[in-house]
Image (cartoon, rainbow, N blue to C red):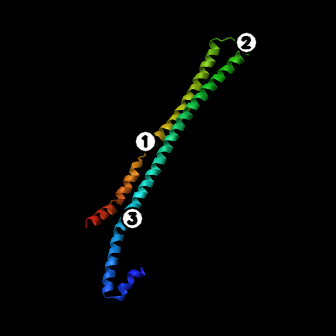
Amino acid sequence: MQALLAPILAGGAGAAAAGAGVAATAAAITPMTLALGAIGPIAQGMSAMNQAKSAKEQAKVNSFIGVTRARQTDTAAREGLNSELSNVRAVLSANGQRPNVGTMGIFDELRASRETARRVGFNNEMQGAAGYKAQAGSIKPGMGLASGLIKAGPSLFDLYQWGKS
Protein backbone atom coordinates (compact mmCIF):
# COMPACT_ATOMS: atom_id res chain seq x y z
CA MET A 1 0.00 0.00 0.00
CA GLN A 2 2.88 2.34 0.79
CA ALA A 3 4.32 1.65 -2.66
CA LEU A 4 1.08 2.81 -4.23
CA LEU A 5 0.75 5.94 -2.08
CA ALA A 6 4.40 7.13 -2.12
CA PRO A 7 4.37 8.56 -5.69
CA ILE A 8 1.06 10.28 -5.05
CA LEU A 9 2.43 11.98 -1.94
CA ALA A 10 5.63 12.92 -3.81
CA GLY A 11 3.61 14.67 -6.56
CA GLY A 12 4.59 15.35 -10.17
CA ALA A 13 4.73 12.84 -13.04
CA GLY A 14 5.09 9.96 -10.63
CA ALA A 15 1.79 10.98 -9.13
CA ALA A 16 0.04 10.66 -12.47
CA ALA A 17 1.53 7.21 -13.03
CA ALA A 18 0.65 6.19 -9.50
CA GLY A 19 -2.85 7.58 -9.96
CA ALA A 20 -3.26 5.33 -12.99
CA GLY A 21 -2.06 2.39 -10.89
CA VAL A 22 -4.57 3.19 -8.20
CA ALA A 23 -7.33 3.46 -10.81
CA ALA A 24 -6.32 0.07 -12.21
CA THR A 25 -6.37 -1.38 -8.71
CA ALA A 26 -9.79 0.16 -8.04
CA ALA A 27 -11.01 -1.22 -11.36
CA ALA A 28 -9.81 -4.68 -10.37
CA ILE A 29 -11.44 -4.43 -6.98
CA THR A 30 -14.85 -3.40 -8.32
CA PRO A 31 -15.75 -6.68 -10.08
CA MET A 32 -14.37 -8.62 -7.11
CA THR A 33 -16.53 -6.59 -4.73
CA LEU A 34 -19.59 -7.03 -6.90
CA ALA A 35 -18.97 -10.77 -7.26
CA LEU A 36 -18.47 -11.16 -3.50
CA GLY A 37 -21.73 -9.26 -2.94
CA ALA A 38 -23.49 -11.88 -5.06
CA ILE A 39 -21.73 -14.91 -3.58
CA GLY A 40 -23.03 -14.30 -0.04
CA PRO A 41 -26.76 -14.54 -0.85
CA ILE A 42 -26.17 -17.45 -3.22
CA ALA A 43 -24.28 -19.32 -0.50
CA GLN A 44 -27.10 -18.59 1.95
CA GLY A 45 -29.59 -19.88 -0.62
CA MET A 46 -27.59 -23.08 -1.08
CA SER A 47 -27.45 -23.51 2.69
CA ALA A 48 -31.22 -23.02 2.93
CA MET A 49 -31.69 -25.54 0.11
CA ASN A 50 -29.54 -28.12 1.90
CA GLN A 51 -31.42 -27.56 5.16
CA ALA A 52 -34.73 -28.00 3.34
CA LYS A 53 -33.47 -31.20 1.69
CA SER A 54 -32.47 -32.50 5.12
CA ALA A 55 -35.84 -31.58 6.63
CA LYS A 56 -37.67 -33.21 3.72
CA GLU A 57 -35.66 -36.40 4.06
CA GLN A 58 -36.26 -36.46 7.83
CA ALA A 59 -40.02 -36.05 7.27
CA LYS A 60 -39.96 -38.96 4.81
CA VAL A 61 -38.10 -41.10 7.35
CA ASN A 62 -40.58 -40.13 10.07
CA SER A 63 -43.45 -41.06 7.75
CA PHE A 64 -41.91 -44.47 7.09
CA ILE A 65 -41.37 -44.98 10.83
CA GLY A 66 -45.02 -44.04 11.46
CA VAL A 67 -46.27 -46.61 8.94
CA THR A 68 -44.00 -49.24 10.49
CA ARG A 69 -45.32 -48.42 13.96
CA ALA A 70 -48.90 -48.64 12.67
CA ARG A 71 -48.22 -52.11 11.28
CA GLN A 72 -46.54 -53.15 14.52
CA THR A 73 -49.50 -51.84 16.52
CA ASP A 74 -51.88 -53.78 14.30
CA THR A 75 -49.86 -57.01 14.57
CA ALA A 76 -49.44 -56.68 18.34
CA ALA A 77 -53.17 -56.10 18.80
CA ARG A 78 -54.06 -59.13 16.66
CA GLU A 79 -51.59 -61.33 18.55
CA GLY A 80 -52.92 -60.02 21.84
CA LEU A 81 -56.49 -60.86 20.82
CA ASN A 82 -55.48 -64.37 19.74
CA SER A 83 -53.69 -64.85 23.05
CA GLU A 84 -56.69 -63.67 25.06
CA LEU A 85 -59.10 -65.87 23.11
CA SER A 86 -56.87 -68.91 23.58
CA ASN A 87 -56.69 -68.21 27.32
CA VAL A 88 -60.48 -67.96 27.53
CA ARG A 89 -60.81 -71.23 25.57
CA ALA A 90 -58.34 -72.91 27.93
CA VAL A 91 -60.24 -71.70 31.01
CA LEU A 92 -63.59 -72.79 29.60
CA SER A 93 -62.13 -76.15 28.62
CA ALA A 94 -60.61 -76.62 32.07
CA ASN A 95 -64.02 -75.96 33.59
CA GLY A 96 -65.53 -78.55 31.30
CA GLN A 97 -67.65 -76.09 29.36
CA ARG A 98 -68.31 -76.90 25.75
CA PRO A 99 -68.60 -74.26 23.04
CA ASN A 100 -72.18 -73.00 22.95
CA VAL A 101 -74.15 -69.85 22.34
CA GLY A 102 -73.03 -68.27 25.65
CA THR A 103 -69.35 -68.92 25.19
CA MET A 104 -69.49 -67.75 21.57
CA GLY A 105 -71.13 -64.53 22.77
CA ILE A 106 -68.19 -63.94 25.11
CA PHE A 107 -65.74 -64.47 22.22
CA ASP A 108 -67.70 -62.15 19.95
CA GLU A 109 -67.83 -59.39 22.56
CA LEU A 110 -64.12 -59.70 23.30
CA ARG A 111 -63.30 -59.65 19.58
CA ALA A 112 -65.45 -56.57 18.99
CA SER A 113 -63.89 -54.56 21.80
CA ARG A 114 -60.31 -55.54 20.90
CA GLU A 115 -60.90 -54.91 17.18
CA THR A 116 -62.09 -51.40 17.94
CA ALA A 117 -59.00 -50.71 20.05
CA ARG A 118 -56.79 -52.18 17.30
CA ARG A 119 -58.35 -50.04 14.58
CA VAL A 120 -58.08 -46.88 16.67
CA GLY A 121 -54.41 -47.53 17.46
CA PHE A 122 -53.61 -48.35 13.83
CA ASN A 123 -55.44 -45.30 12.50
CA ASN A 124 -53.77 -42.98 15.02
CA GLU A 125 -50.32 -44.16 13.92
CA MET A 126 -51.26 -43.87 10.24
CA GLN A 127 -52.57 -40.35 10.79
CA GLY A 128 -49.21 -39.33 12.27
CA ALA A 129 -47.43 -40.93 9.31
CA ALA A 130 -49.71 -39.08 6.88
CA GLY A 131 -48.86 -35.81 8.63
CA TYR A 132 -45.15 -36.41 8.10
CA LYS A 133 -45.78 -37.41 4.47
CA ALA A 134 -47.69 -34.17 3.88
CA GLN A 135 -44.91 -32.23 5.57
CA ALA A 136 -42.34 -33.85 3.26
CA GLY A 137 -44.46 -32.98 0.25
CA SER A 138 -44.74 -29.33 1.26
CA ILE A 139 -40.99 -28.77 1.61
CA LYS A 140 -39.50 -27.35 -1.59
CA PRO A 141 -35.67 -27.29 -1.35
CA GLY A 142 -35.29 -25.38 -4.62
CA MET A 143 -37.08 -22.39 -3.14
CA GLY A 144 -34.13 -21.70 -0.81
CA LEU A 145 -31.73 -21.54 -3.73
CA ALA A 146 -34.17 -19.40 -5.72
CA SER A 147 -34.39 -17.01 -2.79
CA GLY A 148 -30.60 -16.73 -2.68
CA LEU A 149 -30.42 -16.07 -6.41
CA ILE A 150 -33.10 -13.39 -6.14
CA LYS A 151 -31.21 -11.71 -3.29
CA ALA A 152 -28.01 -11.87 -5.35
CA GLY A 153 -29.77 -10.38 -8.38
CA PRO A 154 -28.85 -6.73 -7.74
CA SER A 155 -25.17 -7.59 -7.31
CA LEU A 156 -25.18 -9.78 -10.41
CA PHE A 157 -26.93 -7.04 -12.37
CA ASP A 158 -24.35 -4.48 -11.17
CA LEU A 159 -21.56 -6.85 -12.18
CA TYR A 160 -23.13 -7.26 -15.62
CA GLN A 161 -23.48 -3.48 -16.00
CA TRP A 162 -19.88 -3.01 -14.92
CA GLY A 163 -18.75 -5.54 -17.53
CA LYS A 164 -20.64 -3.71 -20.28
CA SER A 165 -18.95 -0.40 -19.51
Mark 1, Cα crowd under 10 Å, few <14 / some 14-19 / many 20+, is few
Q: Nearer the viewer, mark 2 or mark 1?
A: 1
Q: Marks 2 and 1: CB-CB under 8 Å?
A: no
Name the residue at the left extreme.
165
Which of 164 and 38 lies nearest the eye of the viewer?
164
The answer to whether 119 is drawn above or below residue 150 in the figure is: above
Pointer 2 or 1: first along the chain: 2
Which of 131 and 98 lies nearest the eye of the viewer?
131
Query: How far separated are the C-alphas under marks 2 and 1?
Result: 59 Å
Q: Which mark is residue 96?
A: 2
Asked if residue 26 lies left or right of residue 65, the reply is left
Q: Nearer the viewer, mark 3 or mark 1?
A: 3
Q: Amino acid at mark 2?
A: Gly
Residue 10: name its quadrant: bottom left
Query: How far separated are the C-alphas under marks 2 and 3?
Result: 89 Å
Asked if residue 82 lies left or right of residue 130, the reply is right
Q: Say what secondary structure mark 1 lies in.
A: helix
x 56%, y 27%: residue? 116
Q: Amino acid at mark 3?
A: Leu
Residue 88, position as x, y percentages in the image: 68, 20
Q: Amino acid at mark 1?
A: Gly
Query: How far separated are the C-alphas under marks 3 and 1?
Result: 34 Å
Residue picked out by circle 3: 36
Q: Which mark is residue 137?
A: 1
Asked whether the viewer can see residue 137, the reply is yes
